[in-house]
Image (tube, helix red, strand yellow):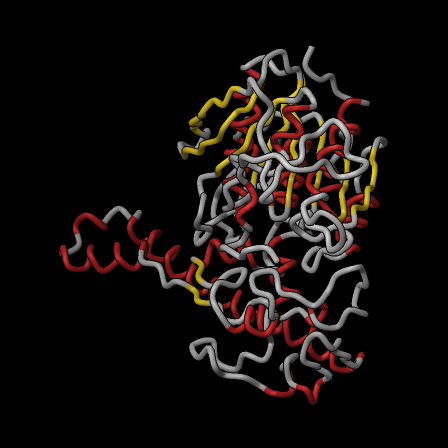
Amino acid sequence: MPQFIGRHTIFHGFGRSASETPPGVEGFTWWGSERFHLPEGTKQTNVRLQAEDGAHSSGILYTRGGEKTAIVFNHPRADFSSHYLTPFLVAGGYAVYGGQTRYLGNDVNCEHECLCADLAAQVRYLRAEGFENVLFCGNSGGGPLSTFYMAQANTPVGERLSTTAAGEPYDLNELDLPQADGLIVLAGALSEGALELANLDPSVIDEEDPLSCNPDLDMFNPANGYRKPPAVSEYSQEFLERYRAAQVDRCRRIDARAKQEVARKRKYRAMMAEPGFADLPLDEQNYITRMAVACNTLVIYRTMADPALTDLSIHPNKRGIIGLMQPDPQSANWSIPGFVQMMTAEGWLSTWSGLSTQVNMHEDAKKVTQPVLAINFEADVTILPFVTEGLYDNAASADKALVRIDADHFAFKEEGPRDAGIPETGKVIVDWLTQRFPAAS
């Protein structure tokens, strides 16, 4: 069982002692304690970048020398500077850039439109370093982010997004968005918003009361088909239809609160811009200024309640009954942290609202003409098969592949060496890369 710490487990780093090599994964070194060594001679360069909008991001560039192709990892808020696949890609002759975006560790105000500027800065940096090819490897929430960036970069200037999901000016047509050369999506979400919509608990009656609950919409109510794990729940089609409709209704209510908040700030910003503002009494100026900038944070309770977590007949795969953050899905839903608990209005609308976000991996893939590798983890409890299959089906690329790996969301396997899915995934990616992009000379 992985240790659950925040959104991602602890095995993103590299470790020490060697043990055995899993069968069928030759060429890679297997390390005990869920950790892997970087190849000998790997150089790690700390990088600090400034985007065109002035924001800063960071990362680590891993090289051994002579690499012609760089693979870029990003996530809206998680630290992918030491992603677990880095040792295998470096061993295969590829440079790796592990990114840390401007929202590292806290996506309370995360706007995906702004993240395009961070990813653009990374591509420019790597091109300036002499890499002939730059590819994104989008893992988990990094999947829709990377696809979103590539779709916008592939869109002609003048046709790109010009506002955030909140309707605030942020014109991607004014940014230099260099194209990438390929896309790898590893257990990538449709979008964080779509993932949250599927998990938003519709039984919440009062957004101010985390204990409020409508039993008729409670997926953990035995009367609705819930069974205590390890038994499998069985929800009726009628319940699921009511449940999904109520999830949309709740999302709409949260969106309405967020949009009201945005409108209030916009109204008072306009007042600050009026010619007579500086002539108003100071107390009026102060009031208007505060109303223009103050933020009522949205608190969203119970955000891990997808019936597919306990009813395995919904989008069936090889998953078991387990929450992503905690072993028990009910405890994961009713406790902290969930996917999202606290957001600004702008961050909610852009990132976690399934109705307002402008990110959709299936739609964005229709603009991705570069080579695409879509990897589905067959035992994933969160990213269900239709998401990766939809990426593959919708990708505009003539060169695309769909690979299925028998592992969970973190590349863990149920049978045999628990971490065997990590080097297996690394080998799949390196094999795909070597057929298309030159490795180190």
Residue at (54% x, 60% y) in the render: 339
Between 94 and 208, the residue placed more toward the observer is 94
Give residue 70's quadrant in the image. Answer: top right
**Residue furthest toward the bottom?**
223
Point out the image quarter for the C terminus. top right
Query: Residue 268 placed where, x, y %?
Result: 33, 56
Residue at (23% x, 50% y) in the render: 277
Labels in figure, total = 0
Image vertical order of residue 247 relative to residue 26, above or below: below
Image vertical order of residue 159 relative to residue 134, above or below: below
Residue at (75% x, 72% y) in the render: 311
Give residue 116's quadrant in the image. Answer: top right
Between 387 and 270, the residue placed more toward the observer is 387
Residue at (52% x, 30% y) in the render: 174
Point out the image quarter for the N terminus. bottom right
Between 414 and 85, the residue placed more toward the observer is 414
Q: Is residue 133 left or right of residue 260?
A: right
Query: Residue 285 placed where, x, y %?
Result: 20, 55
Query: Residue 410 placed where, x, y %?
Result: 65, 49
Whether residue 179 is visible, yes or no, is no
Between 421 and 57, the residue placed more toward the observer is 421
Whether residue 237 is visible, yes or no, is yes
Image vertical order of residue 61 relative to residue 278, above or below: above
Q: Is residue 70 left or right of residue 313?
A: left
Query: Residue 56 placed where, x, y %?
Result: 41, 33
